[in-house]
Image: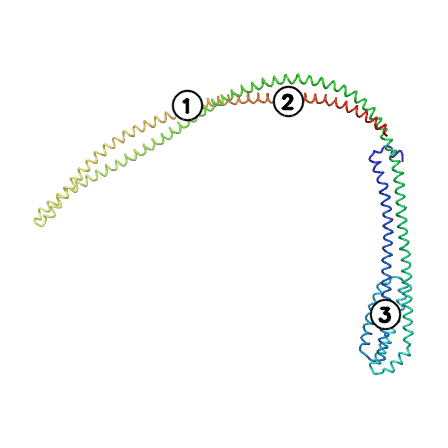
Amino acid sequence: MASQTKGWKLRYWIILGYCVPIVLTALSSLFVFSCVQTVREKSVELQHSSEINQKVHDLETDVQARSRATRGYLLQKATASLEVYREAKKHLAETLNALHDLIQDPPQQKNLQQLTPLLQDLEELDQELFTLVDQGKTTQAVERWKMMNERERMGAISTVLETMVAREAEIVHAGEVAGQQALDQLLIAIVLTTILSIGIAIGLGTWIIRKIVQQINQSASVVASSTNEIAVSVEQQERTANQQAVSVSETTTTMDELGASARQSAEQAEAAAAGARQALAIADSGNQAVGRSIDGMAALKQKVGAIAEQILRLSEQTSQIGNISGLVSDLANQTNMLALNAAVEAVRAGEHGKGFAVVAGEIRKLADQSKKSAEKINLLVADIQTAINSTVMVTDEGTKTVEEGVKIAQQTAESFSGVTDAVNNVVLNSQQISLNVKQQAIAIQQVVDAMNALNVAAQETANGMGQVRIGTQQLNETASNLKAIV
């Protein structure tokens, strides 16, 4: 046991010191619970026996009531006696059934078996007597009652009932004795378990304290020797940390200067990138202007084409007007000829053709006017045709001029595109240079931050080493004090 518990930790000893009293308390509680259960069972048995006694007394009362009702019915045939008998008979049957359910004791069950036929015989006799009285044979009924000696039957029933009461009294007495014994055992168990728990707890606690003190003494000795070794190592680490702090401080200064140079380079690269972006914006604006010029030329070309188409349509319509004017002129000549023929026919007709001659003269006038108008229209159509031809020539020249302008604008756009690509490459290169310089500046700043952190860490390490040295000294003193106290 000693070898097994030698390597135990302190918490295991403390747990052991708590577990033993708890186990003893649990065992005593189980024993007390068993005793309490015994007392409870005996109490239930006593209550059960009391109920059986009450039922036996009720049974005896019902038997006597039934016997009195029978005698009263023999002396005087009264309905009240018959009702009393029936009520007593009913209550007796219920009580007897209840006793059959309640009684578990074998001797009592045997007594109940003896009682049942006696009650049945008495009931049969009572029924026979009631029948004789109902038939008007009261004298024969009285003689039958005397001859059957009902008093002896009642005595036998009373004897069995008294036996049952006596048996229940024995059961009650035995239960009371057992209950008292259980209570005595409960009291003894409580006292013994209390004394035993206190004794074992004191003894075990003393033994555990001795073991704990022994372990603490050993641990204090080990701590004291270890703190001396730690103190020497801490002094060496403190000197090394101070040297590292000086080196890190010098490196930090150098990295600060390099970071400032990198930031200046980054600013210059950013300025170059900004100028390149401005040139790219100007080139984009020129390219957009050329694009708009090309779009305008294309729109102008479309409009000039549309004008040419409209002029061609106008020329065709003018030709149609000339044709119509020729038809009108021919129609006027034919009308004039018809009017002349009509005048000749009117002259031939004499007086009857004068009105017709007047109409023919008016038609000739209209035909002459139509011919003159057609001639004027032909002259106008010829002038318009000449103007249209001139306009067609001008629009052709305009179309050619627009096409040449479009070609020139496209060449200009191609030139701007080359400039834009070149400037864009410059911008990309400038941005890449700026980005690289910024990344270098960020990296240098990160190195500076890391060196600052290392510097702070080195200083904190040096301070921590000093605190560890002080703590080690205090721990050594505490171990010595603990060893002295224990």
The Cα atoms of the two marked residues, 1 and 2, are separated by 54 Å
- Dot 3 amino acid type: Thr
Q: Is residue 305 above or below residue 40?
A: above
**Furthest residue toward left:** 350
- Dot 1 amino acid type: Thr
For image coordinates 82% across by 68% down, the residue present is 94
* Image coordinates for residue 143, horizontal then vertical, percent: 89, 81
Labels in figure, total: 3
Residue under pointer 1: 412
Q: How is the image coloured?
A: rainbow
Q: Secondary structure at mark 3?
A: helix
Q: Where is residue 6, by image quadrant?
A: top right
Disc 1, disc 2: CB below 8 Å? Answer: no
* Tag in front: 1 or 2: 2
The label shown at residue 449 is: 2
Q: Is residue 102 above or below residue 236?
A: below
